Amino acid sequence: MTVTEGIPVRRPLRVMLVDDSATELYLLKKVFALAADMEVVASAENGRDALDLLPQVQPDLVCTDYHMPVMDGLEFILRAMRVHPCTILVMSAAVQSFHKENIFQMLSAGAVDVLAKPLGHAGGISAAEAQRFLEKVRAIAQLPSLQRRLTQPVPKAQPVASVLPGSGLGSGSGPVPSLDRVELVALGASTGGPQVLQVLLSQLPAHFGLPLVCVQHISEGFLEGMVSWLGSSAKLRVEMARAGLSPVPGHVYFAPDGHHLTLDQRRCFALAPCTGQDLHCPGVDPFFLSVARVYGPAALGVLLTGMGRDGARGLKAMREAGATTICQDESTSVIFGMPAAAIALGAARYVLPTNGIAAMMLRLGDQGLWAMEAPGTRD
């Protein structure tokens, strides 16, 4: 940031592009040229060249593809996080089955999110598509606390005992909800969610006695890859929710692309197509609101890392219906937006780190509150 006549002026965000396609680099540079607050300061055709440029260029944001010669995107991210930790976005048009899991391994390595590349064609990229793409990039890249968080990877799974009394998480009093009255775990997440979900699901045993249903914001086309990637490390069965089916224990369900997911009065999944008015689709709020109506106190609601406010209103409705509600804490959230909005509404009964959330799921029947309650929410 510089100062002109006593007025602070924010310098443009320094962007580096990494892609082996000269055409893709040309199109991406044209898109970023539309943003006065962003400047492409370097580009590279493979990860090795990009790694060499990092100390010289010191970008605020790196946008990288996965499939490249010499050094691919995954190896680049692993090395970049040691050389010059910064915000890294995976940008790919590669949603084919042989690329999907590799893309999500890049998130595990330290990338913050995966975005679909704006599609180029004979007439270039439409202004509307370019602006939608830039809005997503801008929202991630300009968060003031993001780079600090990305220097520390999302915590790896630890034994549940590490988050029990004496682990430094604090203590409290009051009843912990009984496992007997909880029949569904409802989760919502956005940016940073896939990484946190991988940690949570890896903690749960194959005999976990509840169904889990999740709404995750992600670019269209990448959800199937995320489900496959999560399923490869989870002991539970991870799959897409299908209309008319009821959630069953030991399964993890995700809202499919292009549809809002809800539960009807029979406790069966229902799907509604997205409209042009939807800010998020699938949305966390519609799902949480339906869980509040259908399950009432027999649900556990969990709102994880992400930008914006989606899920805050729905989580509040769940709490008002008697459900147990948890928000991920700031220290383990990649972006403390959605959880913070829910806490501000009084929607969270508990505020927990990643491993504490898994422990709460596993130990709902235990007596004594070892977790840190949200300010002003103790029953």
Image: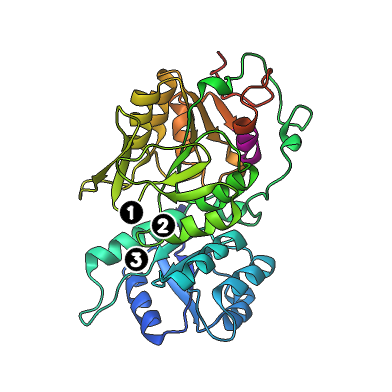
For the residues bearing labels 3 and 1, Cβ distance under 8 angstroms: no
Residue furthest right in the image: 166
Quarter of the rendering containing residue 318: top left
Quarter of the rendering containing residue 296: top left
Say which label, 1 or 2, has the lower sequence index. Answer: 2
Can the viewer see residue 7 in this picture?
A: yes
Q: Which residue is at 33% across, 24% downward? A: 293
The span from disc 1 to disc 2 (Cα, nearest Å) is 7 Å
Instruction: Name the spot of residue 306 as percent of width and height, x first.
Output: 47, 45
Q: In the image, which residues are magenta? A: 352-359
The span from disc 3 to disc 1 (Cα, nearest Å) is 28 Å
Instruction: Name the spot of residue 361 as percent of width and height, x first.
Output: 59, 32
Say which label, 3 or 2, has the lower sequence index. Answer: 3
Disc 3 versus disc 1: nearer the observer: 1
Q: Nearer the viewer, residue 334 or 258?
A: 258
Q: Nearer the viewer, residue 20 or 12?
A: 20
Q: Amino acid at mark 1?
A: Asp
Q: Please give the residue where the numbered disc 1 appears in the rendered image.
A: 257
Q: Is residue 331 above or below residue 12?
A: above
Q: Which residue is at 35% across, 31% downward? A: 267
Q: Please give the residue where the numbered disc 3 appears in the rendered image.
A: 35
Q: Which numbered circle lies on residue 223?
A: 2
The local secondary structure at tag 1 comes to: loop
